[in-house]
Each structure stands twice: as structure tokens, then as C-alpha cells.
Image (spheres, rainbow, N blue to C red):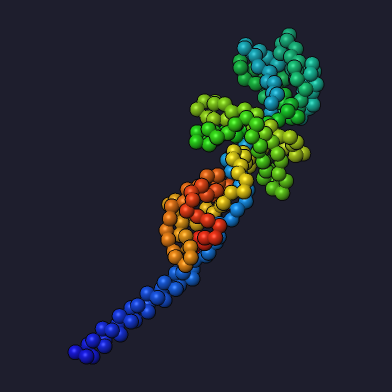
């Protein structure tokens, strides 16, 4: 009986020892981070497409033949320059720009409402971004925008939201840049960050400390799982708007 009791006690001690080792290893895999105080900026991200603001397309409502093409793709034209002779009708460009498309050859018959010649002003550009409903509700005219082109990652350009409008069940943001990088052309894309929120001198916690809206708080040696309410987010940190987290606390983050 005595031996059996000793066996049970020994087994219990081994079990408790294993729990202690596992607990130690688990805690050892956790990172401790303190909340910090500072400024935070919240952005909405999207993919912008470079779009020309002034484009002229030569079209006709009738089937006509092209007597003479007076331009080719890549030509620079001024306002009033001749573009194409359609039978007895000479078409001139109402804008200055670059000939970006010539769809027919001399002598061919043109199809009604199909572009024959396209002139694009490459100096009048803007960015067009399509956003989902939840995001578009937070975008307003005048908000600051940071833009980064794929081939110019080290060069960020500032812009501003000029307008927000719907188009065929899409929600569009028009962004105009203060200065365009050299060589940017219509059709190119850029990463866009629209600044929709800014807070100064606020308490922040890392978003990776959150799990289903809760964090593990370590205060005065006591570990506790609590809910955390956040305000402005910047992708890595979140503003704390609840009163149950302080600068002296530590947050446990599983590595």
C-alpha cells in the first residue's frame, strides 16, 4: 500500500513537472511589448490607374472611306492640326497631344462609331481608383494621398482627392498629383494610400497582439485576457480608446 502511495505521489509530481516545463516553454515563446504613445495615421489603400484627362477620338456616324491619313502613331499635334481626310471631310484636332492610335489605313472603309484616330494629351493626367463601399464612405475631397509607382518604389509622390463618384456600380476616386514623375503614361498603375484619419499623442498597441478583439495583458505580474477597443489603425498599430490598457502594462504576443 505504501509503495502504491509513493508511486501515485511520484506520478503526480512528474505530471506537475511536465506542466511546469510546458508552461515555461509556452511563456518563453511569448514576446512582451509595451503600449506606446505617439501619432498615428490611418490610410485606405488601393490600386490607381493613370488616366488621361483630355482625349479626342475621330469617329463618324456613316460608313466612309479614308482618302488620306495625315498623321501616324506617336506624332505630336497641336490644336487645329489636320488628322485625316474622310472623302471630302477634313478632320482637325481640337486639342494638342500625341497620336496614340490609328486604327485604319488609307483607302479602307471605316465602321460607324469606331475610333479612327486617337489624340491624347499626355500632360493632363490623373489617377483613378476603384474602392469598395465600406472604404469609399470614408474618402472625402481634399484628403492627402501618397502614391508609389512600381518602378519608382523609393520615390513617393503626393496627391489630393479631387472627387468621389459612382460609375456602373463602381465607386471611383479621382486623384490629382502635385508633380508627375518623368515617363509616366496612361494605363500605368500605382499603389495609392489615402489618408482618412490622423490622431496625435495617443496610446497605441500593435495589431498583432490582438486575437478576436482581445489581448493578453500583464499588469503587476498578473496575466489577464481583456477586450481592447481600437480607433484609428495604420496597418501595424492601433489607437486604444478603451480605458483598460495603460503605458505601464505589457502585452503578451505569441511568437
Quadrant location of the N terminus in the rendered image = bottom left
From where the camera sits, is residue 140 visible? yes
Which residue is painted at 42% across and 61% down in the image?
224
Which residue is painted at 37% across and 77% down in the image?
18
**Residue, far left:** 1
Where residue 94 appears, as percent x and y from the top left, is 75, 17
Closer-to-camera residue (90/45) = 45
Q: Is residue 58 left or right of residue 46?
A: right
**Residue, far top:** 88
Which residue is painted at 41% across and 76% down in the image?
21
Which residue is painted at 74% across and 14% down in the image?
91
Closer-to-camera residue (214/57) = 214
Where residue 200 appears, as percent x and y from the top left, is 62, 46
Closer-to-camera residue (242/3) = 242
Q: Which of the 4 image quadrants contains residue 79? A: top right
Where residue 234 appears, as percent x and y from the top left, is 58, 47
Closer-to-camera residue (253/56) = 253
Looking at the picture, does residue 53 appear above or below residue 138? above
Q: Is residue 197 left or right of residue 184?
A: left
From where the camera sits, is residue 211 visible? no
Q: How many marks?
A: 0
Looking at the picture, does residue 29 appear above or below residue 8? above
Where residue 98 appears, as percent x and y from the top left, is 76, 27
Q: Is residue 190 left or right of residue 34?
A: right
Amino acid at each position: 500500500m505504501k509503495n502504491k502511495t509513493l508511486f501515485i505521489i511520484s506520478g503526480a509530481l512528474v505530471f506537475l513537472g511536465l506542466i511546469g516545463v510546458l508552461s515555461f516553454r509556452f511563456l518563453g515563446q511569448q514576446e512582451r511589448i509595451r503600449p506606446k504613445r505617439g501619432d498615428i495615421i490611418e490610410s485606405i489603400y488601393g490600386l490607381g490607374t493613370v488616366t488621361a484627362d483630355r482625349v479626342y477620338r475621330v469617329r463618324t456616324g456613316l460608313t466612309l472611306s479614308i482618302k488620306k491619313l495625315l498623321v501616324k502613331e506617336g506624332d505630336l499635334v497641336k490644336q487645329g492640326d489636320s488628322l485625316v481626310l474622310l472623302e471630302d471631310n477634313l478632320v482637325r484636332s481640337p486639342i494638342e497631344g500625341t497620336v496614340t492610335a490609328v486604327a485604319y489605313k488609307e483607302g479602307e472603309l471605316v465602321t460607324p462609331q469606331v475610333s479612327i484616330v486617337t489624340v491624347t494629351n499626355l500632360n493632363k493626367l490623373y489617377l483613378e481608383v476603384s474602392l469598395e463601399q465600406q472604404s469609399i464612405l470614408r474618402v472625402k475631397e481634399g484628403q492627402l494621398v501618397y502614391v508609389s509607382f512600381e518602378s519608382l518604389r523609393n520615390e513617393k509622390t503626393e496627391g489630393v482627392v479631387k472627387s468621389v463618384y459612382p460609375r456602373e456600380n463602381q465607386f471611383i476616386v479621382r486623384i490629382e498629383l502635385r508633380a508627375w514623375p518623368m515617363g509616366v503614361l496612361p494605363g500605368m498603375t500605382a499603389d495609392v494610400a489615402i489618408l482618412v484619419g490622423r490622431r496625435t499623442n495617443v496610446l497605441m498597441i500593435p495589431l498583432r497582439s490582438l486575437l478576436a478583439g482581445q489581448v493578453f495583458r500583464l499588469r503587476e505580474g498578473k496575466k489577464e485576457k481583456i477586450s481592447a477597443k481600437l480607433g484609428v489603425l495604420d496597418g501595424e498599430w492601433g489607437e486604444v480608446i478603451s480605458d483598460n490598457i495603460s503605458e505601464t502594462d505589457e502585452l503578451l504576443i505569441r511568437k
